[in-house]
Image (cartoon, coloured by chain):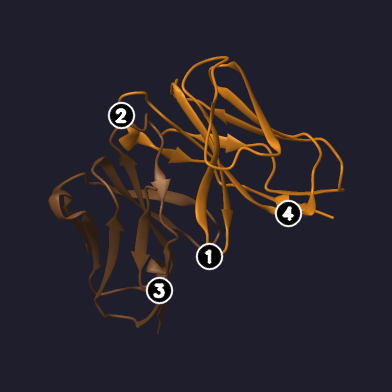
Chain colours: A orange, B brown
Amino acid sequence: DVKVTQSSRYLVKRTGEKVFLECVQDMDHENMFWYRQDPGLGLRLIYFSYDVKMKEKGDIPEGYSVSREKKERFSLILESASTNQTSMYLCASSFEDRVRGYTFGSGTRLTVV
Amino acid sequence: GIQVEQSPPDLILQEGANSTLRCNFSDSVNNLQWFHQNPWGQLINLFYIPSGTKQNGRLSATTVATERYSLLYISSSQTTDSGVYFCAARFTGTASKLTFGTGTRLQVTL
């Protein structure tokens, strides 16, 4: 089975801190995605990457950046955390031509205080 | 803009009941998936169904692409079916990303 692993299940950070959320997948997927999930809003795409060192903005990229130096790892960076970035963050991956293989990590619940 | 809308937003069922969840999408799609998020937050892919009908045990799904909707049927519901059901679509011309609906929260009671 494909595994998508997110480094932390729960995280508490202070306003203004730089925050790194890590995601690793073990099935050689080309595509990787970062979503945030908020009550009543569903999942919203922050950034995605279709290859090493490639990235595309999603629907809500403001306040975030990403890094993909290796195929298996996709990092989400909050440059200066703010309270409105308190959310559940979900990483996913898929093959380029088979989006049906969309697989999610178990999520990181981030609280910014 | 492109949208995925789900109904109802919340649903409470007694164990053993049947239900239908609906997903409407605003434009043509080449990929439509249903996911279940369990109470611990894990999202599991249920169906990849850009068109037609599929069945997996007590669950089945139908997508009518020409009319821009998909339905998820749950029969003989069990408490383990509780959680949030998401519909997600890849709209034609939008690369590999999926656009998610806001979900249907299902609670199955004894």
Q: In terms of sequence position, does the residue under pointer 2 or pointer 1 come before the other? A: 1
Rendered location of residue A16, percent (x, y): 87, 42
Front position in the image: B75 or B21: B21
When the figure is inspected, residue A86 is found, relative to residue A96, above or below; the finding is below
| Circle 3 SS class | helix
Q: Which residue is mark 1?
A: A40
Labels 2 and 4: the sequence-earlier one: 4
Subunit that carries the residue with mark 2: A
Query: As drawn, is B5 to the left or to the right of B19?
Result: right
The reply to whether discs 4 and 1 touch (Cβ–Cβ < 8 Å) is no
Q: Secondary structure at mark 4?
A: helix
Q: Amino acid at mark 1?
A: Gly
The mark lying in front, picked from 4 and 3, is: 4
Percent position of residue B13, x then y: 35, 81
**Dot 2: what SS?**
loop
Q: Label 4 marks which chain's residue?
A: A
Count of marks, rendered view: 4
Residue holding disc 2: A98
Helix, strand or loop for disc 1: loop
Q: Give me the C-alpha separation between circle 4 and circle 3.
A: 34 Å
Lateral position of residue B59 relative to residue B7, left or right: left
Q: Callout 3: residue from which chain?
A: B
Residue B8 place in picture, x, y as percent: 36, 73
Where is the N terminus of chain A found, in terms of image quarters? top left
**Chain at tag 1:** A
Whole-number angstrom distance, CA of label 3 to CA of label 1:
23 Å
Q: CA distance from mark 4 to mark 1?
A: 15 Å
Q: Which mark is residue B79?
A: 3
Q: Name the residue nearer the viewer: A86 or B94.
A: B94
Do pointers 2 and 1 mark residues of a single chain? yes
- Residue assigned mark 4: A84
Please, what is the three-letter code of the amino acid marked with disc 2?
Answer: Arg
